Image (spheres, rainbow, N blue to C red):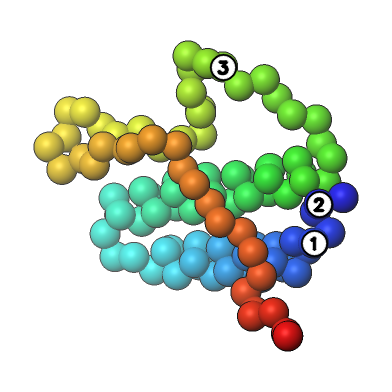
Amino acid sequence: MANEQFDKDFGYLMPFLDKIAAAGRNLSDPAARNEFAQLIAGEKAKWARIRELLSGAQGQAVSKTGGDQNRPQADSGNDNSVAIKGPFAFTVGSLRPRKQ
C-alpha cells in the first residue's frame, strides 16, 4: 500500500505533533492555550485519518454543501478573526534528501 512509503515520515510527524502539544500546554494566556489545544488536536486527528486512508480504510462521503466539519471556522463577530481561505494543502515527503 501507499502507506508503507510514508511510515518513516509518520514516525517523525506524530511525535513532533505530540511535542508541539506539550509545548502549547505551557502558554500563559488561557485563551491562547485553549485555541492551541483545539488546533493541534484537529491536526493530529487529520493526520491519523490520512494514515488510515493510506492503509486502505474506507472513505467517507464528503458533503458538497457541508464542507469539512473538522476545519476551524473564523469567528465573524470578532474583528481580530482571520478569514480562512480555500482548502488546506499539505505536502508530505521524505525529510531527508535522496542519495544519488
Residue positioned most to the left: 79
Q: Nearer the viewer, residue 79 or 30?
A: 79
Disc 3 element: loop
Disc 1 element: helix
Image coordinates for residue 90, horizontal then vertical, percent: 53, 51
Disc 2 element: helix
Q: Is 34 left or right of 6, judged from the image as shown?
A: left
* Neighbourhood count class around disc 2 (C-alpha, 10 Å): few under 14, some 14–19, many 20 upward: few
Residue type, numbered disc 1:
Gln
Residue type, numbered disc 2:
Ala
Q: Is 16 left or right of 37, judged from the image as shown?
A: right
Q: Which picture quadrant has residue 93?
A: bottom right
For marks 3 and 1 on the same chain, the one whose residue lies earlier in the sequence:
1
Q: Which picture quadrant has residue 33?
A: bottom left
> Could you tell me if residue 18 is visible in this image?
no
Quadrant into which the C terminus falls: bottom right
Image coordinates for residue 84, horizontal then vertical, percent: 32, 38
> Could you tell me if residue 96 is visible in this image?
yes
Q: Which residue is mark 2?
A: 2
Residue positioned most to the top: 65
From mark 3 to mark 1, how far is it between C-alphas? 30 Å
Label of residue 63 in the image: 3
Q: Which picture quadrant has residue 36?
A: bottom left
Q: Residue at x 80, y 30 (%)?
A: 58
Camera-near label (3 vs 2) is 2
Q: Which residue is mark 1?
A: 5
From mark 3 to mark 2, how far is it between C-alphas? 26 Å
Q: Is residue 14 above or below residue 65?
A: below
